[in-house]
Every structure is written in structure tokens, then in C-alpha cells.
Image (tube, rainbow, N blue to C red):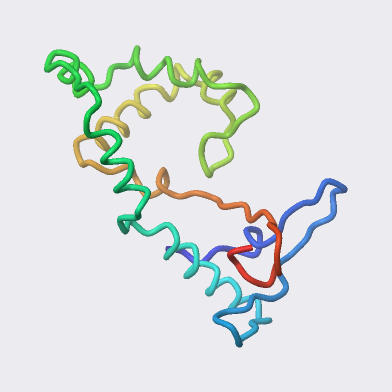
């Protein structure tokens, strides 16, 4: 995971002022005050939190889904078929304006306005991703916005 910039450790409050994480406590004793160390510890915390380990919720989900009806072979083949331009075109058309679906900040309106120019490239990237079984790194990144919860905000879990 890349080291996040200072931008990712600030948030804009409703009054337009920015708030920053000034300290983080790890374990029960160490308080980090240095921005570089705070970023490093935050990346570690959320990397561990969002790792691919099996959780109890996943096991419950698997047992819940076990007895649900299955797709017919015909329907499964259709869904597994090659992505078409017509199918892909429906995605941005069905999205609400004013949203930015990716980390690049490009709003849905961009995709709608320039669809004729970018459609073939987008289709190629997604088809390649389906063949490889993984999206490009730029599509797998995300920005997490930390929202304060109850409790001592020096702890990342809060």
C-alpha cells in the first residue's frame, strides 16, 4: 500500500475549516505525534482491518447463501459472457450525477459527456481485467474518510 499524503489525514468540517489527526495512540501506551509515524500506523491499522482474512461474518454469509436457488446454466453462461459495449454503456447512464465513482475524482457527468471518446478504452480495460481476474491497481484503490465515533479519538478504531 502506498503511503498516503497529508491530504488523506485532513477533513473539511461543515464550516469549511480543516481538521487533522494530531495524535494516535497504539497499543495502550505509545502516543504518536509525528505526522509520518501517524500515517504509517494508520496505513498499518486499516491494511490489517481490510485484509482478506475470513471473518465470522463471511462464514455466516456462506451458510446463509448455501441453500439459495442457483442460476441456470444458460443464465450463468450469459453472465459469464464477454462484456459488450451496450452493457457497459448502461452503467454510467444509470449512475446519479454529482458522484465520482473513482479515486481520480472524475464525476459521472465526465463519463456521460465523453462516452463516445472513451468507451472503447474502458471496454478494453474491463475485458482485460475479466481475463486476468483482477482490476488494474488504479481501480482497486480507495480513499477512506475517517469519521469520528464515540470514545477517545486518539484511537484509530474511534
Query: On the rendered structure, is 118 left or right of 83?
Result: right
Q: Looking at the picture, does residue 10 appear above or below residue 104?
A: below
Query: On the rendered structure, is 50 left or right of 84?
Result: right
Q: Looking at the picture, does residue 111 appear above or below residue 130?
A: above
Instruction: Residue at the far left: name it.
Output: 73
Residue occupying image coordinates x 66% and y 59%: 7
Residue occupying image coordinates x 47% and y 19%: 115
Residue placed most toward the observer, 42 or 68: 68
Residue occupying image coordinates x 33% and y 56%: 52
Q: Quadrant of residue 96?
A: top right
Looking at the rendered structure, the number of numbered marks drawn on it comes to: 0
Q: Position of residue 155 (x, y in %)?
A: 63, 71
Q: Position of residue 56 (x, y in %)?
A: 35, 53
Q: Position of residue 88 (x, y in %)?
A: 37, 19
Residue placed most toward the observer, 59 or 4: 59
Residue placed most toward the observer, 69 or 131: 69
Instruction: Residue at the far bottom: name it.
Output: 29
Quadrant that contains the N terminus: bottom left
Residue occupying image coordinates x 14% and y 13%: 74
Q: Looking at the picture, does residue 29 appear above or below residue 82?
A: below
Q: Position of residue 94 (x, y in %)?
A: 50, 16
Quadrant that contains the C terminus: bottom right
Query: On the rendered structure, is 121 left or right of 101?
Result: left
Query: On the rendered structure, is 119 left or right of 76?
Result: right
Amino acid at each position: 500500500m502506498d503511503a498516503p499524503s497529508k491530504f488523506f489525514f485532513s477533513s473539511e468540517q461543515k464550516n469549511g475549516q480543516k481538521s487533522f489527526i494530531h495524535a494516535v495512540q497504539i497499543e495502550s501506551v505509545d502516543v504518536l505525534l509525528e505526522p509520518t509515524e501517524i500515517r504509517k500506523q494508520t496505513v498499518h491499522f486499516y491494511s490489517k482491518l481490510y485484509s482478506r482474512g475470513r471473518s465470522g461474518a463471511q462464514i455466516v454469509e456462506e451458510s446463509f447463501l448455501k441453500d439459495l436457488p442457483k442460476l441456470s446454466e444458460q443464465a450463468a453462461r450469459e453472465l459469464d459472457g464477454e462484456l459488450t459495449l451496450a452493457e457497459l454503456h448502461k452503467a454510467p447512464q444509470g449512475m446519479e450525477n454529482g458522484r465520482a465513482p473513482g479515486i481520480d475524482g472524475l464525476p459521472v457527468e465526465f463519463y456521460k459527456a465523453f462516452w463516445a471518446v472513451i468507451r472503447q478504452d474502458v471496454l478494453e480495460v474491463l475485458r482485460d481485467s475479466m481475463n486476468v481476474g483482477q482490476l488494474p491497481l488504479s481501480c482497486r484503490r480507495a480513499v477512506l474518510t475517517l469519521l469520528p465515533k464515540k470514545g477517545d479519538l486518539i484511537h484509530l478504531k474511534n
